[in-house]
Image: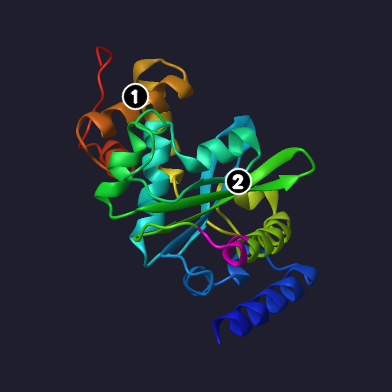
């Protein structure tokens, strides 16, 4: 029974957190299935407020693609949850108000996502990260499903706090940061054009959106030398 399996998983993760394990102890694919989601991701709120994808099922492209969309476009449920410290839900992206996420909603629908929920991981009043789930079918989240997601969010925060800070920035001895190539590419653009790192990141995101390319594809093209951004944009 899925509910028994979920309770067993949460018990094992609580024990893992108590013994110092980090997020790698949580199986992303099994967790998403037991929470009745098609994709589940956890983003870390890094220094300066930027969100970095830290945990997802590597074999399921949906969660990573939705997170990359939000990073590129600067809007979406994960960003709203991080900004407000409140859970953000959209039961049907087809029916979402046009001004809610004018760029993210149609792009997410193109990836077959129909339902999203983002739960902030709170340390007091501070947001340490965001747990974001999605489904490819529309419909509200039941009270039980919201409660189960909140239960996992609590143990996920405990596991996150066990991750050494140096591994969150370097990717060593802990989970890799999904967008590490983006920051490497931004450093290259900064050095070439003599601009700030924030402006370099903005140019990378703009290029990805303008040419309808994944942000990681743009970053890797810059790193490999196949793409050169110019000072005139």
Residue 67 in the image: state x and y as whole percent. 42, 47
In this view, 85 is above or below 92: above
Q: Which mark is residue 87?
A: 2
In this view, 225 is above or below 113: above
**Residue drawn at (51%, 51%), measured in percent from left and top?**
117
Residue 228 in the image: state x and y as whole percent. 24, 28
Majority SS type along the magenta span: helix
Does residue 71 appear anywhere in the picture? yes
- In what quadrant of the picture does the N terminus appear? bottom right
| The one of 148 and 55 positioned closer to us in this rendering | 148
Element carrying mark 2: loop
Task: Tell me if 23 is positioned left or right of 52 in this view.
Answer: right
* Start-end of magenta stretch: 141-146
The answer to which quarter of the image holds residue 227 is: top left
Residue that numbered label 1 is attached to: 203
Separation of marks 2 and 1 at Cα, in angstroms? 30 Å
Identify the mark nearer the N-term, 2 or 1: 2
**Residue drawn at (35%, 17%), measured in percent from left and top?**
193
Does residue 185 appear anywhere in the picture? no
């Amino acid at each position: 029974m899925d509910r028994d399996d979920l309770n067993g998983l949460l018990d094992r993760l609580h024990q893992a957190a108590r013994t110092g394990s980090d997020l790698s102890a949580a199986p992303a694919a099994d967790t998403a299935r037991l929470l009745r989601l098609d994709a589940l991701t956890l983003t870390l709120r890094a220094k300066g407020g930027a969100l970095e994808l830290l945990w997802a099922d590597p074999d399921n492209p949906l969660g990573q693609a939705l997170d990359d969309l939000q990073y590129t476009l600067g809007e979406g449920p994960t960003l709203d949850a991080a900004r407000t410290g409140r859970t953000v839900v959209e039961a049907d992206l087809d029916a979402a108000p046009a001004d809610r996420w004018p760029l993210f909603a149609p792009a997410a629908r193109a990836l077959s996502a129909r339902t999203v929920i983002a739960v902030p991981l709170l340390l007091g009043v501070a947001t340490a990260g965001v747990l974001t789930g999605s489904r490819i079918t529309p419909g509200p989240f039941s009270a039980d499903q919201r409660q189960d997601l909140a239960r996992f969010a609590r143990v996920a925060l405990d596991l996150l706090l066990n991750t050494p800070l140096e591994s969150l920035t370097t990717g060593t001895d802990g989970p890799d940061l999904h967008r590490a190539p983006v920051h490497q590419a931004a450093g290259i653009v900064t050095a070439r054009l003599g601009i700030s790192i924030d402006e370099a990141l903005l140019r990378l995101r703009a290029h990805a959106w303008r040419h309808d390319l994944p942000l990681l594809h743009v970053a890797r093209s810059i790193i490999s030398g196949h793409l050169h951004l110019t000072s005139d944009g």
